[in-house]
Amino acid sequence: MRQEDLVRLLESRGVTPTEQRLEVGKVVLRQPQHLSADEILAEVNREQARVSKATVYNTLKLFVERGLVREINVDPTRMIYDSTTRPHHHFYNSDSGRLYDIEPGAVEISAMPRLPDGTVEDGVEVIIRIRNRP
């Protein structure tokens, strides 16, 4: 993604395009992908930028709030950031730690449970856990 396009995208979502946010955006928004915060931090700092871990986490939190990336909790110790924000599902390979997209039409849910009083549905995301064959 060109820098000018990234600046416009961030501004369109109400995000001030600081140097650090642009560095994180270049990594996480360059293509459809699933990355952990540590992978994003390593990639950002591979190029000559020096961005702190706290800045990466704060930027990712802001990107999630503004709908630029999705946050996927795959296990209690690992959060993955998905640059594809349209509704879809995932395979999660517990051996490799990788996520793979599943198109929404490939998963059918025949019934939903009754929602608790005072709530409305905010989306359904299915994670199918897989592992490598022995």
Image (cartoon, rainbow, N blue to C red):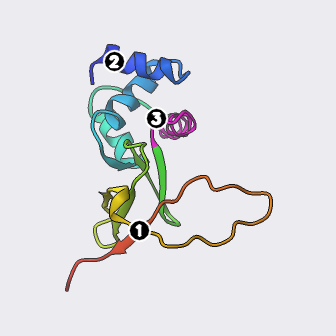
Q: Cα distance, mark 1 to mark 2?
A: 36 Å
Which quadrant would residue 120 be assigned to in this image? bottom right
Q: Residue at x 49, y 17 (%)?
A: 11
Q: Cα distance, mark 1 to mark 3?
A: 26 Å
**Image x and y of residue 109, in percent:** 47, 69
Label 3 Cα neighbours within 10 Å, binned few <14 / some 14-19 / many ≥20 = many
* Numbered label attached to residue 68: 3
For the residue pair 87 and 108, the one nearer the viewer reads as 108
User: Residue tagged by mark 2?
Assistant: 5
What is the secondary structure assignment of the residue under circle 2? helix
Q: Is residue 107 above or below residue 42?
A: below
Mark 1 vs 2, N-terminal side: 2
Type of secondary structure dominating the magenta stretch: helix
**Image x and y of residue 89, in percent:** 39, 59
**Image x and y of residue 65, in percent:** 58, 37
User: Residue tagged by mark 1?
Assistant: 108
Q: Residue at x 33, y 42 (%)?
A: 42
Span highlighted in magenta in the image:
53-69
Q: Is residue 46 above or below residue 18?
A: below
Label 2 Cα neighbours within 10 Å, binned few <14 / some 14-19 / many ≥20 = few
Number of the front mark, 1 or 2: 1
Mark 3 vs 2, N-terminal side: 2
